[in-house]
Amino acid sequence: MLVGLIADTHVPYRVPEISPDAVSALRGVDVILHAGDVDEPWALAPLEALAPVYAVRGNYHILDRSAAGADLPETVTLDLDGFCVIVNHGYDVVGRPASLLWKARSVLRNLVGRWDFPAYDRAIARSLVRHFPRADVIVFGHTHRYYEAVWGATLIVNPGAASRTSYFGAPFPPSVAHLTLRSG
């Protein structure tokens, strides 16, 4: 089974539509998992034309006045080809006060041009593994950076942001990911 992974599309508050390149990169997948910050669920239409889409909400963005897809579930749990797959944006899983502190630290680092912040991704990944110990795969978003790691027996993936949506001119290239699942 070929799974398309996408996150942080931020349509329409930061970009008018999901990038045609991102949509094109997901052609041919069996299912699409959107790891949050959809902003407006109607923006998923180009993805829904390709395959079934499972999306979760993101976090509220004050500058955008975005509800981050508040009508979407916080977490989606799926059985895909025998694998327990969890989709969660990753923002609230470390606890709201800690999330706010990590986000503030990340923003301050970004303001001074320090974009590589693997500790933030690791903190989110560690919290996700604790919250979802039975997961085989956990997909998250939020940091706008590609991240992949194996924690114990769990694969953790952040596909990055589908378009250049970060403030402060972040240097991360837009990205989506493919995940191949094979039973057994």
Image (cartoon, rainbow, N blue to C red):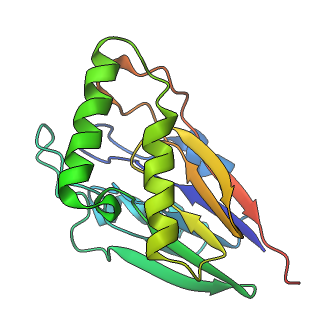
Q: Residue at x 57, y 49 (%)?
A: 159
- Quarter of the image for residue 147 reads top right
The C terminus - image quarter: bottom right
Q: Residue at x 50, y 83 (%)?
A: 77
Left/right placement of residue 99 relative to residue 30 reads: left
Q: Residue at x 57, y 67 (%)?
A: 138
Estimate the x, y position of residue 173 in percent, counting from the top left: 55, 28
What is the tally of numbered marks visible in this picture? 0
Left/right placement of residue 109 relative to residue 81 reads: left
Estimate the x, y position of residue 162 in percent, counting from the top left: 50, 43
Left/right placement of residue 55 relative to residue 93 reads: right
The N terminus - image quarter: bottom right
Up/down of 172 relative to 71, above or below: above
- Quarter of the image for residue 2 reads bottom right
For this rendering, which residue is in front, 178 or 150?
150
Q: Residue furthest right?
A: 184
Estimate the x, y position of residue 114 in percent, counting from the top left: 41, 17
Estimate the x, y position of residue 45 in percent, counting from the top left: 43, 64
| Visible residue check, residue 53 | yes
Up/down of 41 relative to 102, above or below: below
For this rendering, which residue is in front, 179 or 136?
136
| Visible residue check, residue 27 | no
Q: Residue at x 32, y 48 (%)?
A: 11
Up/down of 80 relative to 118, above or below: below
